[in-house]
């Protein structure tokens, strides 16, 4: 029954514009970084630097701290928008399936979209590196590890944004929260006072030189735990509330 609910959610989303942010987010990063390396290669790659390390770090940093949290919020808003806009919650929840199936299927769809978008970024980075004729061997394993870590790091933000998107009918409010969290993460990522913010987890989990003094595994675990907590909180709220 769960997979039938998941399939019906996927069919509904086919009529939406969900593919636009999924494709546009990684393509934007790839194009901007391609131009950055093409026009400023000698400034970006200092003598003695490993070009591949710099290449992966440049992409992953912007992707994790800026794009992934916003993409999570946008996708959460799209996945819940049909029910909010047409006031279909009460009708859908009268259908003969568990509410938890609907909640988890929507959440799973968002996670799948995040993985697909990250995969597009990874493939685009490999193509970009070849076009740029980046010296050295392709560090595919490091690339996969870094992008995989970013997905784990954004898990907490994803679940928070999903819960907010279900809880709040106006989509502008969850998106505004995501923007504020992202801005705080961008400007105060290295501050000890903001390290508790879930929006900084995506950058702290990356296996890059920038995090030499950060316990990466700790933030991976924290992100997963916080994400699971908000799944439980959101699901309990969803089951109890009269939508």
Image (cartoon, grey):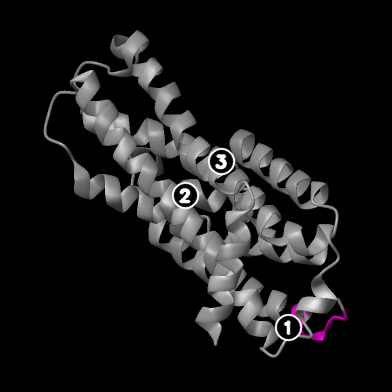
Q: Position of residue 139 (x, y in %)?
A: 18, 41
Q: Dominant secondary structure of the magenta stretch?
A: helix
Check disc 2 and report the residue beneath it. Answer: 204
The segment highlighted magenta reads 238-242
Look at discs 3 and 2 and give the one toward the viewer.
Answer: 3
Query: Which mark sits nearer the N-terminus, 2 or 1?
Result: 2
Is residue 241 on the magenta stretch? yes
Left or right of residue 111: residue 59: left
Helix, strand or loop status at disc 1 = helix
Q: How crowded is mark 1: few (under 14 residues within 10 Å), some or many (20 or more)?
A: few
The reply to whether dot 3 and dot 1 touch (C-beta < 8 Å) is: no
**Cα distance in 3D space between marks 3 and 2:** 28 Å
Q: Where is residue 126 in the image (x, y as percent from the top left)?
A: 25, 35
Check disc 3 and report the residue beneath it. Answer: 20
Check disc 1 and report the residue beneath it. Answer: 236
Left or right of residue 97: residue 85: right
Look at discs 2 and 1 and give the one toward the viewer.
Answer: 1
Which quadrant of the rendered structure holds the N terminus? Answer: bottom right
Helix, strand or loop status at disc 2 = helix
Compared with 193, 217 (above or below) is below
| Quarter residue 230 falls in | bottom right
**Cα distance in 3D space between marks 3 and 1:** 31 Å
| Quarter residue 6 falls in | bottom right
Residue at the limit of the structure toward the left, as seen here: 137
- Residue under the point 24% across and 47% down: 142
The reply to whether dot 2 and dot 1 touch (C-beta < 8 Å) is: no
Left or right of residue 191: residue 42: left
Helix, strand or loop status at disc 3 = helix
């Amino acid at each position: 029954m769960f997979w039938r609910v998941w399939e019906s959610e996927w069919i509904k989303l086919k009529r939406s514009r969900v593919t636009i942010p999924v494709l546009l987010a990684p393509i934007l990063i790839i194009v901007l970084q391609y131009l950055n390396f093409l026009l400023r290669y000698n400034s970006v790659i200092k003598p003695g630097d490993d070009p591949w390390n710099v290449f992966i770090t440049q992409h992953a940093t912007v992707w994790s701290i800026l794009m992934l949290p916003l993409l999570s919020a946008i996708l959460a808003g799209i996945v819940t928008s049909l029910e909010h806009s047409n006031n279909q919650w009460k009708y859908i929840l009268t259908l003969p399936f568990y509410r938890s199936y609907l909640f988890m299927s929507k959440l799973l769809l968002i996670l799948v979209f995040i993985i697909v978008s990250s995969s597009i970024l990874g493939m685009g980075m490999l193509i970009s590196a070849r076009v740029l004729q980046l010296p050295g061997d392709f560090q595919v394993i490091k690339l996969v590890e870094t992008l995989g870590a970013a997905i784990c790091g954004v898990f907490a933000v994803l679940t928070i944004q999903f819960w907010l998107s279900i809880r709040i009918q106006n989509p502008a409010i969850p998106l505004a929260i995501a923007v504020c969290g992202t801005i705080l993460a961008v400007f105060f990522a290295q501050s000890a006072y903001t390290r508790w913010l879930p929006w900084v987890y995506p950058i702290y989990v990356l296996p890059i030189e920038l995090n030499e003094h950060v316990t990466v595994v700790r933030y991976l675990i924290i992100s997963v735990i916080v994400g699971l907590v908000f799944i439980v909180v959101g699901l309990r709220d969803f089951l109890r509330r009269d939508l």
